[in-house]
Image (spheres, helix red, strand yellow):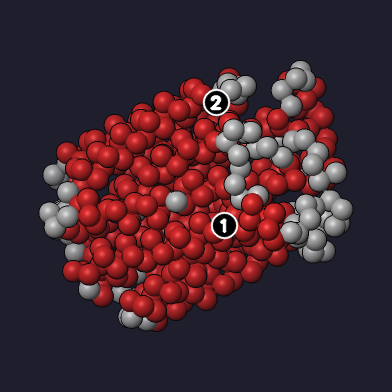
């Protein structure tokens, strides 16, 4: 029973019949998919605000303490955070798959993760020690990322494939809205660090409550979940790309796109401070302004690209096109020497990122090897975006140098993104 095939992977059935069977199976196990969609989207609004604000808030917190040391301190903290996530994310995903609590497989992990994140972010707000801030961020972001990843499994398990890209699109839309709100919020609260660090997490807690209360998270018996064998558990983190080549190609493409996103989105606030010479407060305000400019573009692309992908039944052309657009934006940003030019790059990047995150996640869901390991495998896919948070901050200071050479950093990222686009045609049996 634990190894039953995923309904979404069955491409031998007629589309209408397969969708109908899948929807009935999902409704019987998880409840009405339409209600689930509403609960998921509400939770996504707060969840994305948390996830997309914490890194910006950390940068502003560090620059407000010591601008000269901010880039080095930020790079070290997020590198350590990424290394921890490398092992913890798939482990927690696998443990979630094996949870037999009467409260369900996903609910306990989300509750614990969000509450512990709140405690750690409070620690950053009250401390001015880089060591304390680093420890609190590494631990807090670990809980935030793992619990958010587990939440993200719910639309994969409990939403039919015919609706999934649209749901991911709307989730991405909330992400687009969260960016200007989060950046502006962080910029305004620089002088109140406790609020700057905790308000986004409180928003995530509040918006996830209806999902925790109303979603049918079924209790699984021990015969329904994979056996808890520590050796096999760690071995299972590796998905053999020879046995599952589609999984491997999609993962690699996602990883390369993740390098583009990390190099651009994780360092742009520092770029505004070091290269365009804004103060931390001004940089926070400019970050909010940039996100406000890109929000309508992102919302349009998040919603329309998901709908169009579902309508056409195609994923790969959207992912390829999105990667090319992101690479173009990185080239423009690398040549920018004023805020106006950088704004153009930001808007172009918003187009590519919105399209990529919407359709790529639906593509990931279609190449999962086994339903019983959905949580673990989606966590492995999440690592494709988490690993760049280790690689990029680790090498960025050497690439940037004393002259803060963002042309080189973003140029390298653009080339790697194009390589990722070239990989997608190798994915077979998915349009």
Q: Which residue is mark 1?
A: 89
Left or right: 71 in relation to 78: left
- Can the viewer see residue 281 in this picture? no
State which quadrant residue 21 falls in. Answer: top right
Element type at mark 1: helix
Q: Are dots 1 and 2 in contact, CB under 8 Å?
A: no
Residue at 44 percent of width and 59 percent of height? 82
Image spot of residue 54 (x, y percent): 42, 62
Q: Residues within 10 Å of mark 2 (few under 14, many from 20)?
A: some
Image spot of residue 102 (x, y percent): 82, 64
State which quadrant residue 131 falls in. Answer: bottom left
Q: Which mark is residue 427?
A: 2
Image spot of residue 212 (x, y percent): 70, 60
Residue at 41 percent of width and 32 percent of height? 420
Q: Which mark is residue 220?
A: none
Left or right: 310 in relation to 139: right
Q: Quadrant of the C terminus?
A: top right
Q: Nearer the viewer, residue 220 or 391?
A: 391
Image spot of residue 270 (x, y percent): 25, 58
Residue at 22 percent of width and 36 percent of height? 332
- Can the viewer see residue 284 in this picture? yes
Residue at 17 percent of width and 49 percent of height? 405
The image shows residue 70, relative to residue 426, as above or below, that is: below
Q: Nearer the viewer, residue 109 or 192?
A: 109
C-alpha gap between disc 1 and disc 2 = 25 Å
Left or right: 17 in relation to 378: right
């Amino acid at each position: 029973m634990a190894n039953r095939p995923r309904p979404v992977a069955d491409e031998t059935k007629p589309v209408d019949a397969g969708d109908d069977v899948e929807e009935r199976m999902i409704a019987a196990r998880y409840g009405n998919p339409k209600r689930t969609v509403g609960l998921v989207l509400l939770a996504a609004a707060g969840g994305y605000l948390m996830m997309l604000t914490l890194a910006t808030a950390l940068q502003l917190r560090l620059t407000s303490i010591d601008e000269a040391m901010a880039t080095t301190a930020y790079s070290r903290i997020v590198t350590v955070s990424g290394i921890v996530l490398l092992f913890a994310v798939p482990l927690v995903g696998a443990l979630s798959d094996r949870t037999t609590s009467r409260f369900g497989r996903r609910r306990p992990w989300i509750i614990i993760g969000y509450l512990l994140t709140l405690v750690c972010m409070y620690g950053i707000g009250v401390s001015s020690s880089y060591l304390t801030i680093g420890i609190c961020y590494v631990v807090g972001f670990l809980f935030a990322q793992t619990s958010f990843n587990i939440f993200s499994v719910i639309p994969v398990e409990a939403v039919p494939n015919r609706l999934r890209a649209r749901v991911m699109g709307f989730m991405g839309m909330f992400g687009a809205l969260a960016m200007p709100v989060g950046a502006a919020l962080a910029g305004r609260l620089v002088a109140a660090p406790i609020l700057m660090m905790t308000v986004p997490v409180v928003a995530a807690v509040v918006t996830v409550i209806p999902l925790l209360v109303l979603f049918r998270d079924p209790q699984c018996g021990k015969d329904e979940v994979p056996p808890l064998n520590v050796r096999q558990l760690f071995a299972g983190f590796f998905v053999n790309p020879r046995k599952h080549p589609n999984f491997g190609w999609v993962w690699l493409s996602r990883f390369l796109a993740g390098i583009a996103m990390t190099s651009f989105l994780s360092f742009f606030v520092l770029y505004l401070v070091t290269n365009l010479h804004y103060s931390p407060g001004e940089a926070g305000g400019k970050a909010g302004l940039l996100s406000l400019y890109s929000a309508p573009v992102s919302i349009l692309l998040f919603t329309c690209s998901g709908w169009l992908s579902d309508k056409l039944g195609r994923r790969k052309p959207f992912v390829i096109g999105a990667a090319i657009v992101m690479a173009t934006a990185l080239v423009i940003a690398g040549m920018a020497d004023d805020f106006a030019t950088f704004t153009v790059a930001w808007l172009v990047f918003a187009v590519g990122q919105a399209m990529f995150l919407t359709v790529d996640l639906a593509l990931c869901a279609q190449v999962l090897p086994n339903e019983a390991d959905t949580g673990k495998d989606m966590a492995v896919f999440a690592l494709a975006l988490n690993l760049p948070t280790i690689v990029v901050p680790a090498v960025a200071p050497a690439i940037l140098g004393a002259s803060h050479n963002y042309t080189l950093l973003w140029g390298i990222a653009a080339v790697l993104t194009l390589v990722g686009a070239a990989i997608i045609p190798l994915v077979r049996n998915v349009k």
